[in-house]
Image: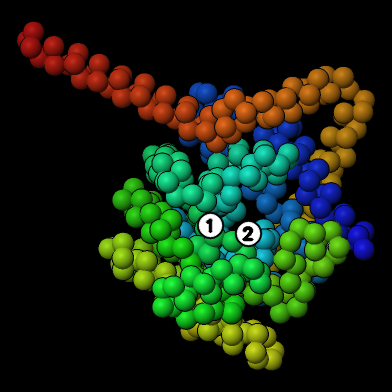
Amino acid sequence: MVSVRGLYFVAMLFLSSFFGSVFMLGPVLPLMLLSPAWYRWLTDRIVATWLTLPVALLELVFGVKVVITGDGFVPGERSVIVMNHRTRLDWMFLWCCLLRYSYLRLEKICLKAALKAVPGFGWAMQVASFIFIQRRWEEDRGHMASMLKYFCDIKEPLQLLIFPEGTDLTENTRAKSDVFAEKNGLPKYEYVLHPRTTGFTFIVDTLRKGENLDAVHDITVAYPQNIPQTERHLILGLFPREIHFHVRRFPAASLPTRADLLQGWCQERWAEKEERLRRFYSEEPRCFDAPEAQVPPCKTELRVALIKAASLIYWSTFITFSLVGLWLLMPVRVYFFLAVLFFLTQQKAMGGVELMELACHHHWSRANGQTGKRKGLGEGQLRKNE
């Protein structure tokens, strides 16, 4: 049966992302035409305010307990985050960890392209410049290279979340992973899927060459009770009681430089995850063993509690004012209609807001390059005349 709690959770996230895209992100879009770098700086911070809302709802309203063990994060560092994909919602639950140990404004997610068409959520993810992929490497390689180069060019710190398994763990995907293991002489896994290493090695190599990588964070996520596999489980009110994250940090300098060795490194991490999760689910109480080295969170629990409370108050008020404005004010309704029309039409015409941002960056890069070239020619002519 549908749960009131579940409906409240989904409604809050949808309305906040929908109205946030229109009334908070929409007015900032013209800045993209003038300075993509400043546009990225500002929109990252606006999107980060929304990322705190699911954390507030999960922990304050529904009492979900979050347990984090392991190395933690160095605040503000640039990294690639690899995580096992136990459910379709792992990416959202990770924000509970990043709120404490990092800065939510740094996070980008590599996710399937179909999600960008979802009203509200998809629009915000486009503006946030998430990397959308078709999951066909021949098509994804060029787009991923362009996005990563853009992040390197603007020098904005980046923490990119990827799921090397490519999909969440189900009976069907586990069976496919077992077939792959048999064909390649690999062990069969029960708690993880065999990772696809091509995208991982490409991302690490590209960011490293662009001097935009400090570390790789290997995160193992587990749910002792109530595993919400899909969004449907949330609507039914089946929230996890606890979410456990085990973080291992690997400095970029410690990673292999050869592609084949880096692929092997990733596969070794997944073999460790399988064993770690086997112990987690077979022992009582269910928990990860924390290593000796541990970086403390960059925010105190008091500060985290205040952020969660402020987020819940702000977004509840924001949704209320958005609805009232649409009901009472004609200018608000006109702007709302135009903004929604823009988000719907631009995707068909341009392919997504993030592609428009990329095009603006290429335009300004060429313009600055031509300006520099003309300046150099002018200085050369001056020297010749002298």
Instruction: Name the element at disc 1.
Output: strand
Q: Position of residue 151 (x, y in %)?
A: 44, 43
Instruction: Name the element at disc 2.
Output: helix
Q: Residue at x 87, y 54 (%)?
A: 8
- Residues packed near mark 2 inside 10 Å, few (<14), some (14 to 19) or many (20 plus): some
Q: Position of residue 318 (x, y in %)?
A: 81, 40
Tell me the quarter of the picture where residue 44 sits: top right
Disc 2 marks a residue whose amino acid type is Trp
For residue 133, say whether it is visible.
yes
For residue 95, say whether it is visible.
no
Q: Give the residue at mark 2.
A: 91
On-image quarter of the N terminus = bottom right
Q: Residue at x 71, y 42 (%)?
A: 118
Is residue 75 depicted above or below 250 in this figure? above
Would you say the residues marked 2 and 1 are in contact, meaning their CB atoms lie under 8 Å apart? yes
From the viewer's side, name the closer residue of 83 and 152: 83
From the viewer's side, name the closer residue of 153 and 74: 153
Is residue 200 depicted above or below 363 in this figure? below
Disc 1 marks a residue whose amino acid type is Leu
Q: How is the image coloured?
A: rainbow
Q: Residue at x 72, y 25 (%)?
A: 341
Q: Give the residue at mark 1.
A: 161
Q: Residue at x 87, y 28 (%)?
A: 326
What is the CA distance from the residue labelled 2 to the residue labelled 1? 8 Å
On-image quarter of the C terminus = top left
Q: Position of residue 269 (x, y in %)?
A: 45, 74
- Residues packed near mark 1 inside 10 Å, few (<14), some (14 to 19) or many (20 plus): many
